[in-house]
Image: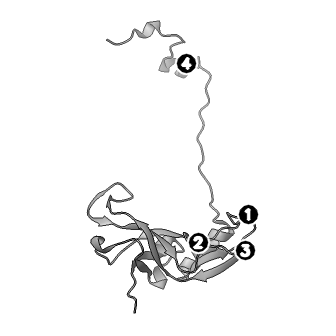
């Protein structure tokens, strides 16, 4: 049973009330013009990716090396202004088998997002990225991996300049 709309509190409004000027209202068109600034640390990081480098930031007080770089140390709250190149290799810290893409499309073959601790960074610091060139059944925590980069002319200064990380063939 639907409610009797005549018994609801308040004043009912009709479209005609707006058109006839009986209701005070303001119509505004919002402008969404904006700019985005990456800042010093992430700007340096993205420029490094375009050049084929993974940059980290080193804290000169507590000696942590973090990736992606930051301008303030999360442990001792000191400025971090030294950016250093790190290896493009690392170790799988955790991973997942995803049968749904970032835009909610189902896939037959799983994507393999992983957190990769980058060599040269402090323990537990790294990147979340995809794994590739590997059988999903062969992925394991502790797996050594290496970045597979886009060709230099295709890079844009984005995390996607690294296509994925593949298993590292150790000698």
Of 52 and 30, which appears nearest the observer?
52
Mark 1 and mark 4: Cα distance apart in space: 60 Å
- From the top left corner, tell me how far across and down residue 98 is, in percent: 33, 61
CA gap, disc 2 and disc 3: 13 Å
Q: State yes or no: discs 3 and 4 in contact (Cβ < 8 Å).
A: no
Q: Which residue is mark 4?
A: 20
Please report whichever mark, 2 or 3, sits nearer to the chain's N-terminal start: 2
Marks 3 and 4, the one that precedes in the sequence: 4
Q: Residue at x 28, y 71 (%)?
A: 137
Q: Closer to us: mark 3 or mark 1?
A: 1
In the image, is residue 83 above or below residue 14? below
Q: Is residue 149 visible in this depiction of the protein?
A: no
Q: Earlier in the sequence, mark 1 or mark 4?
A: 4
**Mark 2 and mark 4 residues within 8 Å of each other at the beta carbon:** no
Circle 4 SS class: loop
For label 2, the residue is 67
Q: Nearer the viewer, residue 13 or 162?
A: 162
Against 75, is 8 above or below?
above
Report x, y in % for residue 22: 59, 16
- Spatial CA distance of label 3 from label 1 is 12 Å
Quadrant where the N terminus sits is top left
For the rendered model, the colour scheme is one colour
Quadrant of res 124: bottom right
**Which element carries disc 2, helix, strand or loop?**
loop
Which numbered tag is attached to residue 81? 3
Mark 1, residue position:
77
Residue 152 position within the rendered picture, expressed as x and y whole percent measured from the top left: 48, 84
Which quarter of the picture shows residue 102? Answer: bottom left
Q: Residue at x 46, y 6 (%)?
A: 7
Q: Of marks 2 and 4, which one's residue comes earlier in the chain?
A: 4
For the point 74% across and 76% down, the residue is: 60
């Amino acid at each position: 049973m639907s409610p009797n709309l005549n018994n609801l509190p308040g004043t009912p409004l009709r479209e005609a009330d707006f058109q006839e000027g009986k209701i005070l209202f303001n119509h505004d068109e919002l402008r969404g013009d904006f700019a985005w600034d990456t800042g010093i640390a992430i700007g340096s990081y993205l420029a490094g990716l375009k050049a084929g480098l993974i940059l980290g930031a080193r804290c000169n007080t507590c000696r942590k090396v973090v990736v992606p770089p930051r301008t303030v140390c999360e442990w001792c709250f000191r400025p971090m202004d030294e950016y250093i190149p790190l290896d493009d290799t690392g170790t799988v810290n955790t991973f997942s088998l995803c049968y749904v893409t970032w835009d909610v499309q189902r896939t037959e073959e799983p994507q393999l997002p992983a957190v990769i601790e980058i060599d040269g960074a402090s323990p537990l610091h790294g990147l979340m990225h995809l794994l590739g060139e590997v059988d999903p059944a062969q992925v394991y925590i502790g797996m050594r991996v290496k970045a597979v980069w886009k060709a230099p002319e295709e890079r844009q200064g984005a995390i996607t300049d690294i296509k994925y990380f593949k298993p590292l063939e150790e000698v």
